[in-house]
Amino acid sequence: MEGDDEPPPSPLFVEGGASAFSSELVPSGVGVDAGGAHGSPNAPAFLQMGAPLGGAEPTLVQPTLFSYNANDLVWARAGTKGNQPFWPGRMIDVMEAPEGVRREAVPNSVCVQFYGPSASKGRDRDYCWATAEQLAPFGENLALLEQQNIPKRLRPTAYREALVEAKELYAELGNNVSAAVAFDPEEAAAEAAGDGDDLEDAEMARCSSCSMALEAPGGYKDTGRCRLCAKLHREGQYCPVCDRVWQWANCPAMVGCDSCDFWVHCACDGPARTVMEAQERGDEVDYHCPRCRVKADEEEDKRREKEVKSAEKAAAKRAKLEAKHATKKAGKAEAKALGVSPSGKVKKKKKKK
């Protein structure tokens, strides 16, 4: 991918002055339809709507990202507008992606390798980073999305080749095609961690999150991480306990904090593991990550300290008033005994007639 002299495919929509994804990653079959209707952002584009399927209006099925696994067959579109077609592809482990693709990572998205011929002669496949809104399971949406009518400018022949390739894999292996993928994530992780016999390779600086070899000893901008992990860490896509960046395609069991936006590895926090087990039983249990628990404890300590200070202040004020009242009462009693008025004047005894 890197070093290609071929011109990039059609650029994506520019939103807010910047493209959502690099145009290098996108097949030209997923381009800009300048004259198309925008419609709903999740509506499948270029869909020939004839008679409703099964007598009902067809609906695009789009679960959350946690519903997907590495090597799942998917439909993906590179842009965020609704006038671009969904293209058949495979959700891949980020370690399988070329370095140029890894650098274009977007938080809360997965890497998709598109089927069919690439738009550039210098590479075999095209890629994109897709959010949940740009992604759909292949099998559940096949009857709907295979009806897409791809305009000539968006490489319909390439699309048909991609669809045939994906349908053959789906017919043979179902929605997950791991059995047909040569890439082994465990082997790649071991290789990235330097488990080989090469001493020079073993001593190479590694990313603190994914164990990939670093371009510089200190990592990207001295973060100790590779460029991809540094970017995702900056965007908050990491476990706050172990501080390691996680990926949607290969993340272990995690639980989302109900107080903040962070997700925590169950292996990193006992309460997270307990909540996960409870949720698997169908129980609804709130979870708060260690940082939020510490913050809540600190806030509770401050609240109690404030209550104690307020109570002490009220007690001191009450004691002061009681002391003042006692002094005043004692003064009156003493004055009465001495026959002196509270103002200090000696009281004159009235003469008896």
Image (cartoon, grey):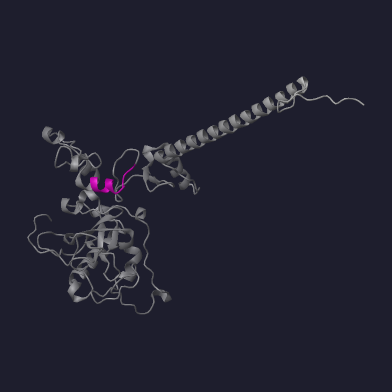
Q: Is residue 329 above or below residue 195?
A: above
Name the residue at 19% across, 72% down: 154
Q: Quadrant of residue 205?
A: top left
Residue furthest to the left in view is 5
Q: Nearer the viewer, residue 260 or 94?
A: 260
| Membership of 237 in magenta stretch | yes
| Membership of 292 in magenta stretch | no
Instruction: Provide the residue span drawn in magenta.
Output: 230-239
Residue furthest to the bottom in view is 50
The picture places residue 251, in percent across and down from the top left corner, at 32, 46
Residue furthest to the top in view is 338
Name the residue at 77% across, 20% down: 337
Report the side of 159 relative to 255 (left or right).
left
Tell me if I can see residue 168 in this picture.
no
The picture places residue 194, in percent across and down from the top left corner, at 18, 37
Q: Nearer the viewer, residue 23 or 75?
A: 23
Report the side of 202 relative to 87 (left or right).
left
Can you say which quadrant of the picture contains the C terminus?
A: top right
Q: Nearer the viewer, residue 312 or 261?
A: 312
The picture places residue 248, in percent across and down from the top left corner, at 31, 50
The picture places residue 331, in percent across and down from the top left corner, at 70, 24
Q: Is residue 29 above or below residue 219?
A: below
Name the residue at 12% across, 32% down: 199
